[in-house]
Amino acid sequence: MLKKTIQTLERCNVHMKWNHLFGSSVRNISSASTTQNDSTTSYSVPREKVDCVVIGAGVVGIAVATALALKGREVIVIESGPSFGTGTSSRNSEVVHAGIYYPRDSFKAIFCVKGREMLYEYCSKHDIPHEQTGKLIVATRSSEIPKLNDILNHGIQNGVDGLKVMNGVDAMKMEPELQCVKAILSPLSGIVDSHSLMLSLVRRCSCYLTTFCIKYRTVIGLSAPALAKRFTGLENRVIPPAYYARGCYFTLSNTKAPFRRLLYPIPEDGGLGVHVTLDLNGQVKFGPDVEWIDGVDDISSFQNKFDYSVHANRAEKFYPEIRKYYPNLKDGSLEPGYSGIRPKLSGPYQSPVDFVIQGEDIHGIPGLVNLFGIESPGLTSSLAIADFISTKFL
């Protein structure tokens, strides 16, 4: 059945299943006869051969699949959700990061700097809405200046061009509603329409298949520790612990946008602080905060069964944080926006952990590539990660 489906797609290299975008040229291969006894359920599904299976159709998964396809690989993308990008990829700040915050020579630093360049180039070439807005990282009191200097040094070590230290007066001239004592200007930071980006990558492919059994040569796993535990032969010692943090966003209502650039405070535990982001329509968003989630079981994680609701009373914690750099924020001006879940490899009060990418040299399983902890700056890094995977492992 899979062979017939592939043939009807004119020998395209990547196959997915989005009938609402591309019509019904691909049949649903997830249907299968099942038999069940007291302890197990077995699925009788045709086993077909394909070069590569990518698990997870977020922005990184789609980017990896596209990179593999462009290098001549036959690829299947498996996604548990109803469509592409329904998880973290559609519930973030949509910021193009410059590469400032991350330790020198880390995956995050390398992929963010390279990915930012690739992303701007891709967006310009394929007419993806984006804007290089620039960003101010601000210290609102003198005790934060040493941390601001550390951030600057990281950015310089990572090769981020154009960084400029500004005193508070000059920064506030650029953004009159801002209050700070010192700032770093990052002119290379910006915003991107993440859905348009993912849709563009998808359209360079065909359509994806949700669940089926297939014989593969290479698997790129993007569903994190919960899925990795189910790979036969993969030892627990190579699977990092999983932590989850919910981040809520609030929008600014009934007010003209007070800022023209992104504004970031000094990072907090688990995130970059409640910052100001803009969308391409000029709407101002504040967030995300950090709410650590306990007791997430593997099945809930894999099936994305998280609570994404944003309660209005959570704004009570936002107002004092925002007023540290935007003192003129009026009571009642924040409205609930949306929330997202960040898959993390470090928990509360632990040092941030780098992206983890494992090949056979780490876990000993031929043809398996694991990606763990691809949180921020995953969107910015997506094309660079895809290039790395398609070059190094294949």
Image (tube, rainbow, N blue to C red):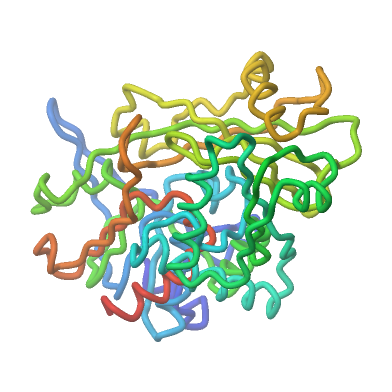
Camera sees residue 161: yes
Residue 123 on image: x %, y %: 67, 72
Q: Residue at x 64, y 33 (%)?
A: 249
- Quarter location, residue 218: bottom left
Q: Residue at x 62, y 76 (%)?
A: 122
Does residue 354 sit above or below 344 in this rendering?
below
Does residue 13 sit above or below 362 in this rendering?
below
Q: How many marks?
A: 0
Quarter of the image where the C terminus is located: bottom left
Q: Is residue 270 left or right of residue 21?
A: left
Quarter of the image where the N terminus is located: bottom left
Residue 197 on image: x %, y %: 63, 64
The answer to which of 6 and 153 lies nearer the viewer is 153
Camera sees residue 22: no
Residue 124 on image: x %, y %: 70, 76
- Quarter location, residue 131: bottom right
Does residue 112 sit above or below 83 in this rendering?
below
Q: Residue at x 19, y 47 (%)?
A: 239
Residue at the extreme bottom: 72
Q: Is residue 198 left or right of residue 295?
A: right
The answer to which of 91 and 161 lies nearer the viewer is 161
Residue 237 on image: x %, y %: 10, 47
Q: Residue at x 21, y 38 (%)?
A: 35
